[in-house]
Image (tube, grey):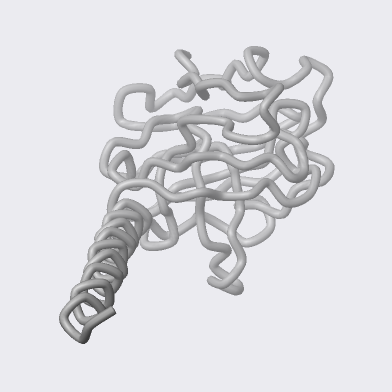
Amino acid sequence: MDWLDFKERVFQKLSWVFDFSKFVIGLTIIVLIIHFFIATIFVVSGQSMEPNFHNGEYLLVNRLAVRNLKRGDVVGLYYPGNPKEKYIKRIIGLPGEKIQIKKSKIIIYNQNRPEGFILYEGLYIPKETITEPNKTWQIDKDEYFVIGDNRENSSDSRLWGPLPKKYLVGRAILILWPFRRINTISRVDY
C-alpha cells in the first residue's frame, strides 16, 4: 500500500465521521428547538390527576397552545413555590373570574355570567368527589385557577392561590407512555 492509498482511505473514513457528526448536530438542534419552543414531555408524578392520568405516565405538552387555553384543559406547569418542579393540573378558572367552592361545588362568576354558574365536572371526575375548602378566590387578568382531578390528593390553586400565566408551559395533548395508554387528550366541552 502506498502513501496515496492510505491517505485516501483515511480521508474517506474521516469524511464519513464528519457527515455523521453533521447529522447528529443537526438532529440535536432540531430536537432542542422542538423541546424549547413547540412541545415538551411532562411526567405525571403522584396521584393528583387520577383517575384520568396516573403516576409515571408521559404526556406531550404543546407549548404553542399556551396562548389559547380554555377551562377544562389539562396543562403542564411549573409549581410557583419551586419552579424546578413540574405539575400536571386542570384549568378551572380563567383570567378575571371569581371562583367559589361551596359544599363541594365550584361556582364561577364572570362577565358573561355575573350571577355565577356551577361547573359540571362529571365528564372527568366522579360525581361524589369532594372539593374543599369552602372559599372564594379572585383571579387577576394574568392568572389561572388550576386543580388536580384527585381533589383529596392534590397540591393546587386551592392551597397556593391562582397560578400566574408565566408558570404555564402548555396544554397536554397526548399520552405517550405507557404504550397501552397512548391516546390523545381531548378538550372538555362544557
Is residue 68 rendered to the left or right of residue 108? left
Left or right: where 124 falls relative to 162: right
Q: In the rendered image of this protein, does residue 137 appear above or below residue 50?
A: below
Residue 21 image position (x, y, % from top left): 30, 68
* Residue 137 screen position, x and y as percent: 54, 49
Q: Please tell me which residue is depicted at 40% across the width and 46% down the height of the picture.
A: 170
Q: Toward which corner of the image does residue 66 lie, by quadrant? A: top left
Q: Tell how many labels.
A: 0
The residue positioned 67% from the left and 13% from the top of the image is 122
Q: Is residue 65 above or below residue 125?
A: below
Residue found at x 63% / y 13%? 123
Q: Is residue 103 visible?
A: yes
To which quarter of the image does residue 95 belong? top left
**Residue furthest bottom in the image:** 3
- Residue sitting nearer the eye, 116 or 39: 39
> Left of 137 or right of it: where is 8?
left
Residue at 81% across / 30% down in the picture?
130
Of residues 2 and 153, the one drawn nearer to the viewer in this rendering: 2
Q: Which quadrant would residue 160 be assigned to in this image?
A: bottom right
Residue 133 can be seen in this image: no
> Is the residue 104 above or below the residue 4 in the image?
above
Judging depth in this view, the residue of 91 and 17 nearest the camera is 17
Q: Residue 142, how many percent across, how many down?
A: 32, 55
Q: Residue furthest front?
A: 1
Which quarter of the rendering shows the N terminus?
bottom left
Q: Is residue 38 left or right of residue 99?
A: left
- Please provide percent x and percent y for residue 158: 66, 51
